[in-house]
Amino acid sequence: MDALDLARWQFGVTTVYHFLFVPLTIGLGIFVAGLQTAWHRTGKEQYLTLTKFFGKLFLINFAMGVVTGIVQEFQFGMNWSEYSVFVGDVFGAPLAMEALLAFFMESTFLGLWIFGWDRLPKRAHLACIWAAAVGSNVSAYFILAANAWMKHPVGYEVVDGRARMTDLWAVLTNPTALAQVPHVIGAAFIVAGGFVLAVCGYWMLRTRRTGDGGMWRGAARAALVMTALAGVLVAATGDTSAKLMYEQQPMKLASAEGLERDTAAAPFSLVPGVEIPAVLSFLATNDPGATVQGTEDLQRRFERQFGPGDYRPDQTIVFWSFRAMIVFGLSTVGLSVLGLWLTRRRRPFPAWLSRALLLSLPLPLVAVTAGWLLSEIGRQPWTVAGELLTASSVSPGVSLAEVATSLTLFTLLYGALAVAETVLLTRHVRKGATEQAPLPAAERREPSLMY
């Protein structure tokens, strides 16, 4: 093992860990904003109670996401300086826009929301949480646009060994980004929905005998709807992504399916040895008879195009990550659809369903992690497809001992942060939500007459 291997491990560990917080922040922010909107429109105190309860969970997760995200920036300079030099002129614009527009908007309005209770007019305070939630999604757009450029570089030229951006609009409207952004945001809503459902399942079980779970039932129903709709979005954008992958990243597609040779009417592999004829060709091109390129034939073509080397990603990880993403993601969405059916017409949540919602908490997290592994490992051995190899991206002069030391420190730090996050979230969830005291009669107003 050399410094390159450890640098890849370090970036992989820190990135996957950070990515656990990102989708929950994106989806939970919108959910909290929706709860506060319901309170604003109806005046029902249970919505205010849920807003503050899930709002605190959102803040805990947001803070941890910021802390773990900062580490990513340091690694570019420490371990991947050659990569930073190559992509810096292209990445400068979208990442600056993310920091100055999206993150500034998100953090500023989130601060106003935190300290604005009883200080800001209700409409202004509601606008703050919506601005913060929208800022999270806009932030994701700029970051994913930069990430999509690594898979399908557009709007640039290479000058003196560096990529120089020639068309910012092309970078921001990269077709890979336009498919990837809604796919990731949809997955984020599934993660947030699964988290809310697990919390509500826990409290519906605890309040089952006392009959005090009506508030949690309402929140659970809202999360079921959000998760089911997000599943439709993820499926639709996943189909688009597969077709783009066929055109732009054929090696990733072939690796995800374990397809070794160019094959007409290519089958979709459920597991090794179990295939559905012609489905892969149809998913990739809408033509069941189309030819899909295989890894071994692509390897020979890439050797002729780029020179000697192994241009295949880790076949095992890519193959099984693809299936884990689908299975665990569909399980979460399927459970949501089942929950909507079983609880229609004000029917109570069965105890077994509440328990299933609680136990299903890891499913969407595993799904998004597997999807991220598929996305990033499937691009290997390139950091920028067709332009910059990962082996050429590492910082020169960085020793194995230096990377091993930083990897150990980051692992210990992230382990401590994981414990802190788990303790804070668990403690707050177990504490529960305290009903807000009703407003005095003189201060109550009908929602239509507010302001």
Image: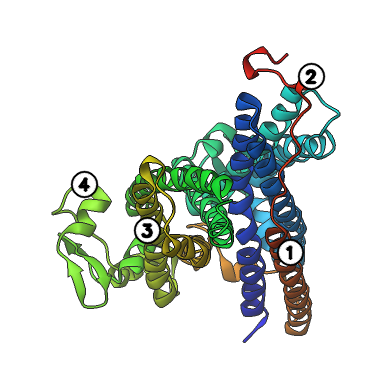
Q: Are marks 1 and 3 in contact (CB under 8 Å)?
A: no
For residue 258, say whether it is visible.
yes
- The reply to whether dot 2 and dot 1 touch (C-beta < 8 Å) is no
Tag 4's secondary structure? Answer: loop
Characterize the local packing of mark 3: few (<14), some (14-19) or many (20 or more) Cα atoms within 10 angstroms: some
Pick the residue in front: 267 or 56. Answer: 56
- What SS does tag 2 mark? helix
Amino acid carrying label 3: it is Leu
Pointer 4: what residue?
286
| Mark 1 / mark 4, whichever is N-terminal | 4
Q: Which residue is mark 2?
A: 442
| Dot in front, 4 or 2 | 2
CA separation in Å, label 1 and label 4: 50 Å
Could you tell me the amino acid type at mark 4?
Asn
Residue at the spot of label 3: 330
For label 1, the residue is 427
| CA distance separating discs 2 and 1 | 36 Å
